[in-house]
Image (cartoon, coloured by chain):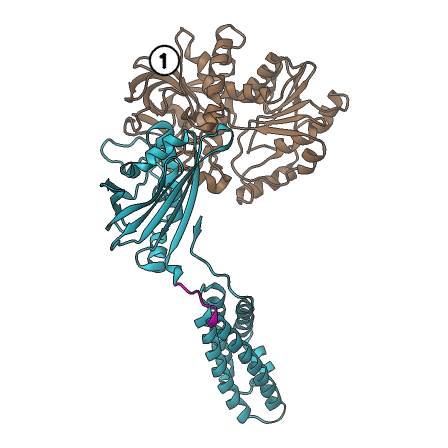
Chain colours: A brown, B cyan
């Protein structure tokens, strides 16, 4: 089959690789019908997630048709149409029992590697480094899906791929980002990053009853999307975000701040950006935490900072004093996608949200190398790319 | 966790070790200054001699600070002192004036140090570890399994199940009256076999076993099962004690090959948890055999495994 493989920093290649086979009794093989490139794939592309290996198949947002099931699979049958969540979860461990699917205790066979960096290991993730399992991803014609009875959700009606594909990651991720804010009537929510996850966080915050949502980014086309969703916008290259947010909230600060940016943030001041960029390039910190720092500093006293942007390792100059002295709560996590599949599919079906609005480009799997370049450099107002094998 | 039955280094020995380190570094870094201070800088050989003594001091430092049984190494230092005193005696004989004064002062200092070393050596010899227990390795590891205690106990109690999650075991055959025959893959693929008996067996609580007769690897082990608090399942704690083949050298060699015993036990328990909670060992294309220390060091790319070639 054809698959999009990571071949080193800034290089992906569509290669001919063997077809997947059942390795565990709970596996299913899915013929991929749609797959997307995620902002977090760019962290891999840019070489900031450790333990990648040449030849690794990328992609953790995919859906398709079941073509084979292992002997222990009970709920899925050949021919079923499914969306596959990006975290791999067993459904039987203590974490899964409590709905903490992205920290499943059994799905990462390379847990020892993750423990060295993080103390304990999170769940395995499709196409997202060996430290997180060494599982091939879904930017391919076929994919093996472990724990087929736990993760994939069957799509039984005629909703098109484009409306349900993002159940795999970015829609529930944005949703969880807003949910962690404990939104109450009157709340003002600030969202750093107006990429697809930020856009879904904005939409989710409104659905949860936020009074106002303020979106922070620097790309006009993204800010326009945020505006269309009803958010007020700030271009951090034009205004001082901390000041502007203080002003917009009459001195209080936003009730909750969502970091939908993660480890490769940009800073409007050249010097500050160069500082973190240099430390990251020399591996003195793995992550550039500018958005996170600003989210903490901006949040109102006693508020919540919700982190859904991906971080890989260590950060520098973390404003712990601000967090502690001002009674802030920080919540974070890779999305526990399995938890949100059914309720969010329900919301798509009843028209509360049509996630396909984030798509800007549709390309073929073979075009993945060009697609990654476009997405990385935000060419042609590239917001979200869907690939079809 | 691994414990190799460590004995703490006595403070005096440790102090001597650090002194050697300081002296050695000074003598190697600035042999000229040291020989001037000692008053022997008039001799063309002094420079080289001081550096050589420096190397010896570093050797003392390394052995004193790292050895679990420092006694022989403290005696080595005493021998070094004797050598130094001889050299200094010859240096005194060949010199006059201020140089002679300096060398004599140095010799007096070395004599005091010699007395200290002698004292430390005698003490260390008296308090040597009685049993040569450094030969024994003991490891423990623990895991929480989201299953009732009885189920977890029962699965382990059937030793024939163990090879399903202990990858270094090839097979375990149980015979009557609590006896069993174990076959394992050695670190360099040499099969190791032994018989074991159950020493203690309390249903749902603990199983203890030890090898009998002439085992290649003398070993014993216990596994304890307790209820995890708040309905979190069962806490499983494993203790293993064994004499690695080839003693400490063999153990170090196995570690070099990636067979770190601690990692192995922890991996075993991780797989045990998988088998108990989901019925099988979880595999990825990067680690097709499932959790394994060696594989984690050398991953396959995350690409489908060709059927019939899981390597």
Q: Quadrant of residue A363?
A: top left
**Location of residue A105 (image quadrant):** top left
| Image position of B65 with respect to A88: above or below | below
On screen, residue A149 versus residue A343, left or right, reads left
Q: Nearer the viewer, residue B119 or A121?
A: B119
Determine if residue A240 is in view.
no
Badge 1 density bin: few <14, some 14–19, many ≥20, Cα 10 Å: many
Q: Which residues are drawn in magenta?
A: B126-131
Quadrant of the rendering where the C terminus of chain B is positioned: top left
Residue at mark 1: chain: A
Question: Depth check: B162 or A135 in front?
Answer: B162
The picture places residue B264, in percent across and down from the top left corner, at 37, 45
Secondary structure mainly formed by the magenta segment: loop
Looking at the image, residue B109 sits to the left or right of residue A303; the answer is: left
Inspect the magenta stretch and tell me whether residue B127 lies in it: yes
Say whether residue B269 is magenta.
no
Q: Is residue A139 left or right of residue B190?
A: right
Q: Position of residue A122 (x, y in %)?
A: 47, 33
Q: Helix or strand or loop: what does disc 1 sit on?
A: strand
Q: Is residue B137 above or below residue A22?
A: below
Q: Foreground residue, A307 or B104?
A: B104
Name the residue carrying label 1.
Answer: A81
Q: Say if residue B217 shows up in the picture.
A: yes
At which x and y percent is residue A136? 36, 30
Write the residue at 33% across / 38% down: B300
Taking the spot 31% from the left edge, 28% from the top edge, the residue there is A24
Is A82 situated above or below B298? above
Give coordinates of residue B67: x percent, y percent.
45, 64
């Amino acid at each position: 089959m054809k698959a999009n493989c990571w071949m080193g920093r800034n290089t992906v290649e569509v290669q001919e690789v063997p077809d997947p086979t059942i390795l565990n009794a709970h596996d299913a093989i899915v013929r991929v019908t749609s797959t997307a490139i995620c902002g977090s794939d760019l962290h891999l592309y840019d070489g900031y997630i450790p333990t990648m290996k040449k030849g690794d198949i990328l992609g953790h947002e995919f859906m398709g048709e079941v073509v084979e099931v292992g002997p222990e699979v009970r709920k899925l049958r050949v021919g079923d149409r499914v969306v596959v969540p990006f975290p791999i979860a067993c459904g039987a461990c203590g974490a899964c029992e409590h709905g903490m699917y992205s920290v499943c205790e059994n799905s990462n066979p390379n847990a020892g590697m993750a423990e060295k960096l993080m103390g304990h290991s999170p769940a395995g993730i499709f196409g997202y480094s060996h430290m997180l399992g060494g599982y091939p991803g879904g930017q391919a014609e076929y994919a093996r899906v472990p724990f087929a009875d736990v993760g994939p959700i069957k799509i039984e009606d005629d909703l098109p791929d484009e409306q349900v594909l993002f159940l795999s990651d970015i829609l529930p991720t944005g949703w969880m980002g807003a949910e962690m804010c404990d939104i109450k009537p009157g709340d003002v929510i600030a969202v750093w990053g107006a990429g697809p996850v930020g856009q879904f966080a904005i939409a989710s915050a409104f659905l949860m009853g936020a009074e106002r949502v303020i979106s922070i980014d620097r790309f006009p086309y993204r800010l326009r999307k945020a505006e269309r969703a009803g958010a007020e916008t700030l271009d951090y290259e034009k205004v001082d975000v901390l000041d502007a947010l203080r002003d917009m909230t009459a001195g209080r600060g936003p009730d909750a701040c969502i970091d939908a940016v993660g480890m490769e943030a940009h800073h409007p001041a050249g010097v500050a950006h160069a500082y973190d960029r240099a430390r990251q390039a020399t591996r003195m910190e793995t992550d550039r935490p500018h958005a996170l720092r600003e989210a903490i500093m901006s949040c109102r006293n006693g508020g919540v900072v919700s982190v859904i942007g991906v971080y890989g390792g260590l950060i520098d100059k973390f404003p712990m004093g601000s967090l502690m002295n001002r009674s802030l709560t920080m919540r974070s996590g890779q999305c526990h996608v399995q938890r949100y599949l059914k309720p969010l599919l329900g919301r798509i079906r009843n028209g509360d949200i049509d996630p396909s609005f984030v798509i800007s480009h549709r390309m073929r799997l073979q075009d993945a190398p060009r697609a990654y370049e476009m997405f990385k450099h935000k060419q042609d107002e590239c917001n979200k790319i869907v690939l079809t094998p | 966790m691994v414990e190799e039955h460590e004995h703490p280094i006595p403070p005096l020995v440790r102090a001597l070790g650090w002194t050697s380190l300081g002296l050695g570094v000074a003598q190697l870094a600035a042999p000229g200054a040291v020989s001037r201070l000692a008053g022997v800088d008039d001799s063309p050989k002094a420079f080289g001699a001081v550096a050589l003594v420096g190397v010896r001091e570093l050797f003392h430092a390394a052995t004193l600070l790292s050895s679990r049984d420092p006694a022989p190494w403290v005696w080595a230092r005493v021998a070094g002192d004797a050598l130094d005193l001889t050299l200094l005696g010859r240096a005194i004989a060949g010199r006059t004036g201020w140089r002679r004064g300096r060398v004599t002062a140095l010799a007096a200092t070395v004599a005091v140090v010699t007395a200290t070393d002698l004292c430390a050596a005698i003490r260390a010899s008296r308090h040597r570890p009685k049993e040569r227990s450094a030969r024994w390795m003991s490891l423990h590891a623990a895991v929480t399994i989201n299953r009732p205690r009885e189920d977890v106990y029962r699965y382990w109690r059937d030793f024939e199940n163990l090879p399903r999650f202990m990858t270094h075991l090839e097979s375990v055959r149980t015979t009557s009256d609590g006896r069993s025959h174990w076959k394992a893959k050695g670190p360099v693929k040499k099969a190791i076999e032994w018989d074991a008996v159950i020493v203690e067996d309390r249903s749902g609580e603990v199983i203890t076993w030890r090898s009998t007769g002439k085992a290649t690897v003398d070993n014993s082990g216990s596994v304890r099962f307790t209820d995890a608090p708040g309905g979190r399942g069962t806490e499983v704690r494993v203790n293993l004690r064994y004499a690695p083949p080839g003693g400490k050298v063999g153990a170090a060699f196995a570690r070099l090959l990636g067979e770190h015993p601690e990692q192995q036990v922890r991996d075993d328990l991780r797989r045990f948890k998988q088998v108990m909670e989901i019925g099988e060992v979880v595999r990825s294309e990067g680690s097709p055999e499932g959790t394994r220390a060696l594989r984690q060091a050398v991953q396959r790319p995350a690409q489908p495994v060709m059927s019939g070639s899981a390597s």
